[in-house]
Image (tube, rainbow, N blue to C red):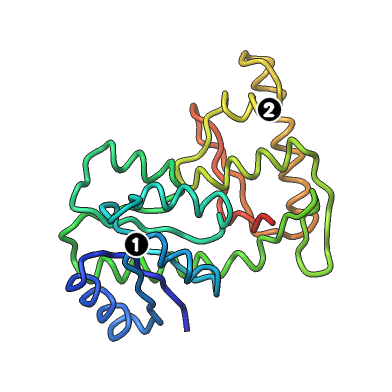
Amino acid sequence: MKTIYLCEDDLALGEAISDLLIIDGGFQVTRAFDGDELRELLAGAIPDLLILDIQLPGESGIEIAESISRHLPSIPIMFLSAFAHVENRIAATHAGGVTFLAKPFEPEELLAIARRLTRLSMNHTQSGVIENKMLRIDSAQIRLTDREVQMMRLMALAGEAGVEYHALMDVVGISFDERGIANLEVAISRLRKKLSEVTSSSVISNKTGFGYQLANPPVFK
């Protein structure tokens, strides 16, 4: 059974969402009221999906997600908020959010997104683990350079939004010009080759005119 941690300070809404996910979605749901309670849950076990309200007592959902994404980038994060303006959506993406659902929302839409994101979490077992510059999947492993690890981490944290060329080039240490773009493409090509050699499900896609996106990132330790 797929597990979801729901961090929502509105008790009535939290109960309604929890019941929806449990009864109609077949999920196992554990609720938290704020960031402190959520971190206690995460210390015990990692869920398949984290659903965060943005307006919370103490730390905001954005701040909580930023903290969690640095250490546990493999957890898909869905944001909920009645304040669905562009600034909040952009901040949610930069904080590691995979999707943003505005309140009020249709129950079926929430269930559909939860199902999609928990399926996404299944892919992490085939995405591998990066530890001490080694990418491991089962018995297969391959060494990454410091720059490759930094690039992977940067793309993992960016989620669906992707990372701009210049940000990756800063990590690789090359100048932002036509020659630099070519050098970045070579670095990405080498990284893709390493991913394929250990049969990782991580996929680096080119976002034309913008940068690169990493789907199904590995777990960083």
Picture quadrant where residue 103 is located: bottom left
Which residue position holds label 1?
34
Crowd tier of the residue under label 1, counting other residues whose Cα lies within 10 Å: few below 14, some 14–19, many 20 or above: many
Q: Position of residue 94 (x, y in %)?
A: 43, 41
In-front residue for pair 39/189: 39
Q: Position of residue 157 (x, y in %)?
A: 53, 46
Q: Amino acid at mark 2?
A: Leu
Residue in the picture at 76% in, 64% down = 137
Left or right for 15, reference 197: left
Q: Give the answer, above or below, for where 146 lies relative to 80.
A: above
Q: Position of residue 24 (x, y in %)?
A: 28, 83
Q: Give the answer, above or below, for where 180 lies relative to 143.
A: above
Residue in the picture at 83% in, 59% down = 141
Left or right for 154, reference 10: right
User: Mark 2 to mark 1: distance in Å?
Assistant: 41 Å
Crowd tier of the residue under label 2, counting other residues whose Cα lies within 10 Å: few below 14, some 14–19, many 20 or above: many
Residue in the picture at 66% in, 60% down = 127
Q: Circle 1 — which element?
A: loop
Left or right for 22, reference 68: left
Q: Circle 2 — which element?
A: helix
Q: Which of labels 2 and 1 is toward the front?
A: 1
Q: Give the answer, above or below, for where 156 lies relative to 44.
A: above
In-front residue for pair 36/89: 36
Which residue position holds label 2?
184
